[in-house]
Image (cartoon, rainbow, N blue to C red):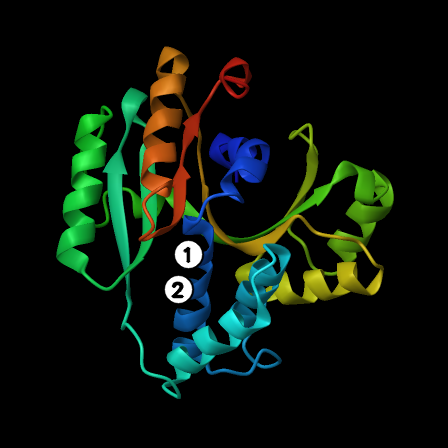
Amino acid sequence: MSGHSKWSTIKHKKGAADAKRGRLFTKLIKEITMSAKVGGGSVESNPRLRSAVQAAKKASMPSDNIDKAIKRGTGELEGVSYEEVTYEGYGPGGAAILIEAMTDNKNRTTAEIRHLLTKYGGNMATAGAVAFQFSKKGYIAVERSAANEDSLMELALEAGAEDFRTDDGEVFEIITDPGTLEAVKAKLEEKGIAMQTAEIQSIAQNMIAVEDKGPALIKLLDMIEDNEDIQKVWSNGDIDEKYLEE
């Protein structure tokens, strides 16, 4: 493991603006529906659904919306049928891009993603060309004001975390195996430590410098993520800190 995508840092900074977008609820509802479809409608026994519901509550989604999304997933209510699709591509500076989508029309979404990649200096890649450059990991971000660094690191590592990082100036980052994410989350919750993010992410195994292509890569990733069919976007582009505030 040699670095976390700067795109996550950028998303921390732009989170407040994103929260105002109407698309946020659409993405959350899709994730809740799919989580219930795949793993059942019980929040207690379905970790993915539990994380989705927690994210929805954090975004102030009404409980009625959450309940209906769960019931659509379990088939108790009729609704749109979604499928999960992964896209792979390259962006400015040769950065690898991994895109996770949830769509009711794969042809439409594929065309839209291909168009965005081409328009903003990238291109679509064949299946498998990019995915091997990323590893699925549990990722937890804790605001620095929420915990003491040494105590948090000790608690996280004792709970089974693989790595603890402090290089992001705004948050402490905890990396886990996907299978131990829930255990580490539970330990932090037990101690009353608020988490900004706690989810499974695709983390780049190696970062590549994109130099002056940083702003172009940020623009491309932003436009892709703005598509309501897109749930997550990952990149191994190592974007210079000077571009993060632009």
Q: Position of residue 98 (x, y in %)?
A: 33, 44
Element at badge 2?
Answer: helix
Neighbor class of circle 2 (other Cα within 10 Å; few <14, some 14-19, many 20+) is: many
156 relative to 117 in the view: left or right: right
- Mark-to-mark CA distance, 2 and 1: 5 Å
Element at badge 1?
Answer: helix
50 relative to 71 in the view: left or right: right
Residue 142, quarter of the rendered image: top right
Q: Position of residue 31 (x, y in %)?
A: 43, 64
Q: Amino acid at mark 1?
A: Lys
- Check the image and report above or below for 224 versus 194: above
Q: Nearer the viewer, residue 64 or 196?
A: 64
Q: Is residue 2 visible?
A: no
40 relative to 105 in the view: left or right: right
> Which residue is rendered at x = 82% and y = 65% of the image?
190
Label number found at residue 27: 1
Q: Nearer the viewer, residue 205 or 50?
A: 50
> Which residue is rendered at x = 35% and y = 16% of the image?
213
Q: Nearer the viewer, residue 61 or 181?
A: 61
Residue furthest to the bottom = 76
> Which residue is rendered at x = 49% and y = 51% of the image?
201
Q: Amino acid at mark 2?
A: Lys
- Check the image and report above or below for 39 versus 152: below
Tell me whether the residue at label 2 lies in contact with that at label 1, contact meaning CB atoms closer than 8 angstroms: yes
Label number found at residue 160: none
Neighbor class of circle 1 (other Cα within 10 Å; few <14, some 14-19, many 20+) is: many
Q: Is residue 70 visible?
A: yes
Q: Nearer the viewer, residue 242 or 70?
A: 70
Q: Position of residue 171 (x, y in %)?
A: 69, 37
Q: Position of residue 139 (x, y in %)?
A: 58, 50
The mark tally for this picture is 2
Label number found at residue 30: 2
